[in-house]
Each structure stands twice: as C-alpha cells, then as structure tokens.
Amino acid sequence: MTTARTIQYEYAPGHFRASEPNLHQADILDEGQMILSMGPQHPSTHGVLRLEVITDGEIIVDVVPHVGYLHRCFEKHAESLPFNQVIPFVDRLDYLAAMNCEHAYVMGVERMLGIQDDIPKRTEYIRVLVAELNRIAAHFVAIGTYALDIGAYTPFLWLMRDREHILRLMEWLNGARMLYNYIWIGGLFYDLPVGFEERCREFVTYLRPKLTELQQLVIENEIFVKRTANVGVLPLPVAINYGCTGPVLRGSGLRYDLRRVDGYSVYPELEFDIPIGKGTMGTVGDCWDRNQVRVQECYESLRIVEQCLDRLLGDYRRTRDYDPQAVVPKKIRPKAMDFYARAESAKGELGFFFRTDGKSDVPVRCRCRSCCFHNLSVIGEISKGAMLADLVAIIGSIDLVMGEVDR
C-alpha cells in the first residue's frame, strides 16, 4: 500500500498535465487553493460546458470557461450550402429559440438581395408571432431550469407544462416541435393553419394568470430571493465591455433591445416595453434582476402576440390570393459584398456576417455572432469572490445554450 501511494504521488503532476488543458497550473497555486473541474456534464452547467474553477476554501478565486465540446461546424456547413439550405442548421444554434434564429438569418439574406420591402405584411406579422411564441418558450426553459438549479422543482414542472402548449402550436404550424425550417428567405414554408389564430388567442388568455402565479411562486419566493439577490452582480460598464446583450445586459439596467433600436420587421408598429433590472431585491445586475427581466419579457411577448393576432384577423387576414412563397427567390445569388445583419434573439443579439462573390448561391464566408458566447465570457468576472455554491446560480442566470456557443 505504501509503494502504491508513493507512485501515485510521484506521477500526479504528469497526470495533471496530460488531462484536460487548463489555464492555471498546480504549481502556481497558493496554499489552500484548489483547481476544480466543473462539467462538462449537462446538469447545472446548462450544456456541455467545462469550468476550470480556482477555489480558496469555499471562495472562488477565478473561473475559466472551456468550450468546444459540442462543436458542430455550423459556419463551415453554411459555406458549403446554398443560402436556403442553411436554415435547418440555423435552427440548431439556439435550439430553444429556433424561430428567432431563423428570423435573424433570413432577414439578413433578404436585405442582401434587396427584397426586404417586397415581403407581404401578413408574412411579417406571422414571423413576429411565431418568434415571440418561441421567445416565451425559451424563457420558460431558462426560468424553469434556473429554479431547478436553486432547488425548486415545482416551477420547472409548471413551466414545462405551459411550454408544451406552445410546442403543440408549433407542431400544428409546421409539423416540428423544436427545429422548424419554417421562416424561409422571401416568405414562409406555409400559411397559418385554419383556426390557429383563435387557438393562439385562447393560449394567451390561459397563460397570463399563469405568469402571475410564476411571479408569486418563484420570483417573490423568500428562498429564491435569498439565493439570487446580490449574487453574481454584473455592473453595467462590465456588461458593455464584454459585449453582453439580451436579458443579461438589460438586467444590468440598460434599456437596449434591437427590436426597438433597429426597428426591424413590423416591431415599430407594435407597442411593448423593454424591462430592465432595477435592483428591487438586491443590487442592479444581480441574478435576481436577470431572472426578473425574463419573466417581464414574457408579459411583453404576450402583448406582442395579441397585437399580431389582431392584425392577422383584421387588416391582414387570410385571403385566397395570399401566397406565403410568392417572393421566395428561385436562385439566391446576392451581389458581391460584406454584410452584417442582426436581430434580438431570446438571449441577446444574434448576428450573421456574410461575404459573397456575386457569382455563387453559396456564401464565401458566413460568420455567426453568438450572444451566448459573449454572455458566457463574463462569468469569470462576476464569479470572483463568490461562494462555490453560488456558481451554479450565476451560470443559470446567464441562460446559456452551448449549441450556439460552439456553433
């Protein structure tokens, strides 16, 4: 037994260097410090994310995210396929908000082609309708799994129950529950099914009181507040410097939303507010604020859905001559240019950079600007000095989807 222990001790540094690559090495640690590898198991790290954590007892000294465990070569796929065949791969970036990803990508290609003004209003309102429904579904996963991280099981079950109604609407719409390929360049895969608007309005009526219950059950819960208030505080200057967007940025107090800033699609015609963190329960920019912003955004998305339904049943009601594919180009061949397009996904600014040569329907370069990647980069900054037990709460408050980070 003594010999075995001696051999293990002598070879430990070698095993350490041969294991997963680390930024920090064992020989630079101070007395009492440890290197812990958290992940890449899916629970608690919200995807195949590995965190290299330096601790001094229960206090976090540094956190280094390690990504790349889910790399799917999205950009290389996009550079080997025609523009319209890339949409199924776009779905798999933020697979919890695929409609939002499709909307951003499709608008970028339409602007390169110069057909953005030819899109029928009914098509635009349908796009916004399904994007906002998908935003609610994505926020439900974020809030539900976050409550699960904190130790509350019931909110997760409630939110998955209500999210199921949205997934069934999406399945009725185009046959898929998560990955849709529904928003096409120049139009839509198909018009709304007959009766979809009425069923959607019933869902809105059903969901609004459920959000009030969610506010009482989770957001205002004393245990939840104690676990999230004044934890993982992200100051606004730090959020801006790291390129954070979406609820992570708005949770720090900045009223910045691309649906208002850029005014794309029909969002300028709709009335909705931009919720921000106010430090109601703790400090502006803490975990509680980020979660509260997502809940409030669900209310605002319901407002947008109702307004879209009013217009889809009013001025832009279905007619026999409406063709959702009337403007879909047969061949997508933009002029030679460098072009960047962006939109407000459920997690922040999702952007696509295109480089085209004017000769091919395949992009020379297609680069995705991932909001989750930028939001993830700030974890090390806001975790220093926190308790190890709070690291899971901080990660969950960022709302990561590793399919978009590793793209």
Image: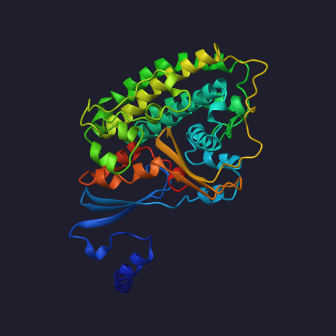
Q: Is residue 109 left or right of residue 234?
A: right
| One can see residue 97 in this view | yes
Colouring of the image: rainbow
| Total number of numbered discs in the rendering | 0
Quadrant location of the C terminus? bottom right
Decide which of 346, 146 is in the foreground and name it. 346
Give the residue furthest to the top: 314
Residue at the spot x=53%, y=50% of the render? 404
| One can see residue 151 in this view | no
Q: In which quarter of the image is residue 81?
A: bottom right
Q: Is residue 6 above or below residue 135?
A: below
Give the x, y percent position of residue 37: 39, 63
Q: In which quarter of the image is residue 314?
A: top right
Q: Is residue 223 left or right of residue 324?
A: left
Give the x, y percent position of residue 266: 55, 27
Give the x, y percent position of residue 153: 44, 36
Q: Is residue 345 left or right of residue 294?
A: right
Quadrant location of the N terminus? bottom left
Decide which of 311, 285 is in the foreground and name it. 311
Residue at the spot x=62%, y=60% of the render? 76
Give the residue furthest to the left: 31
Give the x, y percent position of residue 51: 40, 59
